[in-house]
Amino acid sequence: MEQYKQEFIEFMVDSDVLKFGDFTLKSGRKSPFFMNAGSYVTGAQLKKLGEYYAKAIHDNFGDDFDVLFGPAYKGIPISVAAAIAFHELYGKEIRYCSNRKEEKDHGDAGILLGSPLKDGDRVVIIEDVTTSGKSIEETFPILKAQGNVEILGLMVSLNRMEKGKGDKGALDEIREKYGFQASAIVTMAEVTEHLYNRKYAGKVIIDDTLKAAIDAYYGIYGVK
């Protein structure tokens, strides 16, 4: 596992973004882990988050693209932070763009924030996490309505590695439905591998009991 991935896992724990316990997800599933990117709230956290995204995007897509698109709302600060980090790390100017939930009809009118999109733009969508692909269903037509843009792929923080709407994982369903690459900085398997029975910050975060709960969860909802 790459060093930045190990650091990112610890960063999520330190930032109280990745939590372990008993959680009820929007889907109604009872999960022993939960990720909430809304817990990144400081300048230092957002700077680091942007750097991890930039590294993962560079690993997966190189630098031959033009725009980072962050769907409202959580995708907005992530796309801004990642665009800044991409310039600092790789010396390339990447524009950021996001959508509004409600279209604005005055001043800076329209449905988009940040850079306008134009024909020929190559776009990477950037989100926190996806479990059902619903956000992409909303985002895809918005992007395509802007002109002849090419969507290179999607980058999320964490691949939960569980079933989406069918028997395949949410990221696999997105790949099949839309025909573009869908990747994550880390997978839940990598998180478990890195934290299981290993002391971090003075304690074992994933012990045998929690590991059993994670395994049981994947026994029901995991991708085969």
Image (spheres, grey):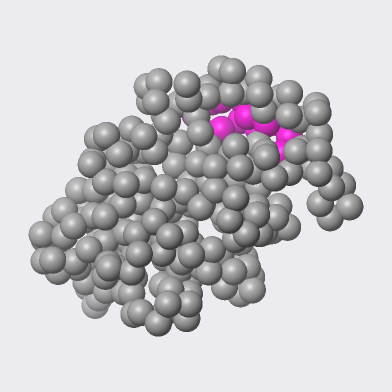
Image spot of residue 165 (x, y percent): 38, 25
Residue nearest the viewer, comparing 174 with 113? 174
Residue at image location 31% in from the left, 52% down from the top: 153
In the picture shown, does residue 110 fall above or below 173?
below
Residue 12 visible? The answer is no
Could you tell me which residue is drawn at 54 percent across and 48 percent down? 186
Does 6 sit left or right of 201 as displayed? left
Residue pushed farthest top?
220
Residue drawn 67% across the image and 28% down it: 214
Residue 209: percent from left, percent from top: 80, 26
Reply above or below: 78 against 106.
above
Tell me where residue 113 appears, x and y as whole percent.
31, 69
Q: Is 183 a magenta residue?
A: no
Left or right of 131? Residue 98 is left
Residue 96 visible in the displayed image: yes
Residue 157: where, in percent of width, then height? Answer: 51, 51
Q: Residue at x 47, y 48 (%)?
A: 184
In depth, the one of 193 and 160 nearer the eye is: 193
185 horizontally vs 170: left or right: right
Specify start and end residues of the magenta stretch as a single range: 20-32
